[in-house]
Amino acid sequence: MDLCETGNLRRWWLFYFLPVFLLTNEVSLKETVVGFIGGSAVLPCSFEEPPLTIQDIKVLWRHSSQNVYDIIYGKVSVEGQDPQYRNRTESFPEEYLRGNFSLKLNNLQHTDAENYKCYIIAESVIKSVELLTKERPERQLPNEGTKPRPDVIVMIISFLCIGIIVSLVNSATASF
């Protein structure tokens, strides 16, 4: 019995391949943030339905089993915070009642690159953010081979010459 002849091909296709498409879609929904070593990065975490009151807010940020940051009843709690994150984390309290619990991680280190989870307790929501860290590209100093481009210099001189000619023509026509 051939699947194409019996019309079962469509059903088999859905049965075998639909889970693959659903899993692929789920993976692509993960947020990814890129930050430079020594710099900072904002890890997004928000919920469409903001809490009604400050007392409704309980958000936990975790990295593996480490306590990164807690917001308990609208206040930051560093009690139990992993020493690796002490004095390097901050959030935006003015945004809490709008449902924004994003976390700013300062002085990024290579060990910070991983997956982070934001748990919004009252709503039973878990947001996942992957942080990637990169070395900051070195900037060249002007004396290290960076020279002004000649086409820019020619353009500036051309504008100056045109401006002088237009001024001379206007003053000549005004005196007649």
Image (cartoon, rainbow, N blue to C red):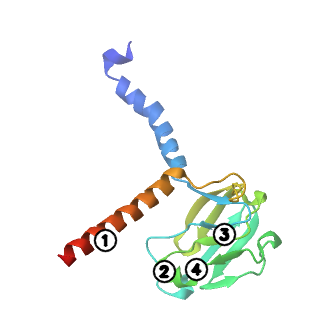
Quadrant housing the C terminus: bottom left
Mark in the foreground, 1 or 2: 1
Q: Residues within 10 Å of mark 1 (few under 14, many from 20)?
A: few
Taking the spot 66% from the left edge, 77% from the top edge, the residue there is 90
- Tell me how far mark 1 sits from mark 2, CA to CA: 64 Å
- Tell me how far mark 1 sits from mark 4, CA to CA: 54 Å
> Circle 4 sits on which residue?
92
Among the two numbered marks 1 and 2 on one chain, the one whose residue lies closer to the N terminus? 2
- Tell me how far mark 3 sits from mark 4, CA to CA: 14 Å
In the drawing, what numbered circle is on residue 61?
Answer: 3
- Tell me how far mark 3 sits from mark 2, CA to CA: 17 Å
> Circle 2 sits on which residue?
51
- Secondary structure, mark 2, is loop
In the drawing, what numbered circle is on residue 136?
Answer: none
- Tell me how far mark 3 sits from mark 1, CA to CA: 65 Å
> Circle 1 sits on which residue?
167
